[in-house]
């Protein structure tokens, strides 16, 4: 009961600190790391593999474990529950068809290409972002009888965490940010529903990683 009363203030404090730290990283530190380290692959590993895991994954795992008795899934459950991936093949195919069609319409071709720094991002993007947004934030707020409001709030929070990188890259002032934002919201809902349906963190991680792979390859 004591931990249950702590959960809401902890969620609020966590969100303020998390968004503050990551905004500073995206706006100021990320560029400084790239400027200080000439090797692009090493710089990307430090940013995506070390810093992101320290800021995203480790605190989230600690909080999942601390509040697991008052969450939708316990820490061990979400990482060990078996998933029948065959049920979700149509979703992976839908992702593929959407990205290929988008590439064809926007670029006129579906030629593929991916860089080494993007491969490093792919190694960590799913586990870091899904551990925070589905494993921790969604898991701590949904119940069997209350799902859609937490899913929608989670989608808005997932969109919000993209703002600093869009601002830093100049995308925020571009008209293309609107369809990108709608896409992020839709993806967040899909990842959340996959987490709830499968009762496993691995499915949203796989979907998230596969989506980013498709985008890196074709977009």
Image (cartoon, grey):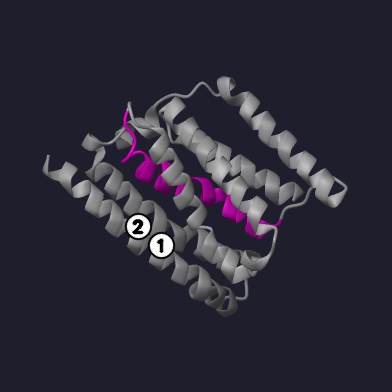
The residue drawn where x is 58% and y is 70% is 168
Q: Please tell me which residue lies in front, 34 or 211.
A: 211
Question: In this orientation, does residue 110 appear?
Answer: no
Point out the residue furthest to the left here: 2
Mark 1 touches mark 2? (CB < 8 Å): yes
**Residue highlighted by disc 2:** 15
Is residue 67 shown left or right of residue 45? left
On the image, the x and y values in percent for residue 32 come to 53, 77
Horizontally, residue 130 falls left or right of residue 64, namely right
Crowding at dot 2, Cα within 10 Å, few <14 / some 14-19 / many 20+, comes out as: some
* Side of 9 where 146 appears, left or right: right
- Can you tell which quarter of the image residue 86 is in? top right
Q: Can you tell which mark lies on residue 19?
A: 1
Report whether residue 28 is seen: yes
Give the total number of marks visible in the rendering.
2
Residue at 44% over, 24% down:
82
The correct choice, above or below, for 82 with respect to 184 in the image is above
* Lateral position of residue 138 relative to residue 101, left or right: left
Q: Nearer the viewer, residue 47 or 130?
A: 130
Q: Which residues are the magenta region?
A: 115-143
Quadrant in which the N terminus is drawn: top left
Seen from the viewer's position, the closer of residues 106 and 48 is 106
Q: Residues within 10 Å of mark 1 (few under 14, many from 20)?
A: some
Considering the numbered disc 2 on the image, is that residue within a helix, a strand or a loop?
helix
């Amino acid at each position: 009961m004591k931990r249950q009363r702590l959960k809401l203030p902890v969620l609020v404090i966590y969100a303020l600190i998390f968004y503050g730290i990551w905004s500073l990283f995206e706006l100021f530190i990320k560029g400084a790391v790239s400027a200080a380290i000439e090797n692009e692959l090493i710089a990307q590993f430090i940013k995506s593999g070390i810093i992101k895991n320290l800021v995203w994954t480790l605190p989230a795992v600690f909080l999942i474990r601390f509040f697991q008795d008052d969450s939708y899934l316990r820490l061990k459950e979400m990482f060990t529950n078996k998933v029948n991936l065959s049920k979700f093949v149509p979703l992976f195919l839908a992702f593929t068809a959407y990205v290929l069609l988008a590439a064809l319409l926007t670029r006129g071709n579906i030629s593929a290409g991916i860089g080494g720094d993007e491969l490093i991002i792919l190694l960590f993007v799913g586990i870091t972002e899904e551990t925070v947004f589905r494993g921790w934030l969604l898991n701590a707020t949904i119940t069997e009888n209350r799902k859609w409001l937490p899913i929608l709030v989670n989608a808005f929070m997932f969109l919000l965490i993209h703002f600093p990188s869009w601002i830093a890259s100049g995308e925020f002032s571009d008209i293309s940010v609107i369809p990108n934002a709608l896409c992020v919201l839709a993806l967040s809902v899909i990842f959340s529903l996959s987490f709830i349906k499968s009762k496993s963190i691995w499915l949203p991680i796989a979907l998230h990683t596969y989506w980013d792979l498709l985008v890196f390859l074709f977009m």
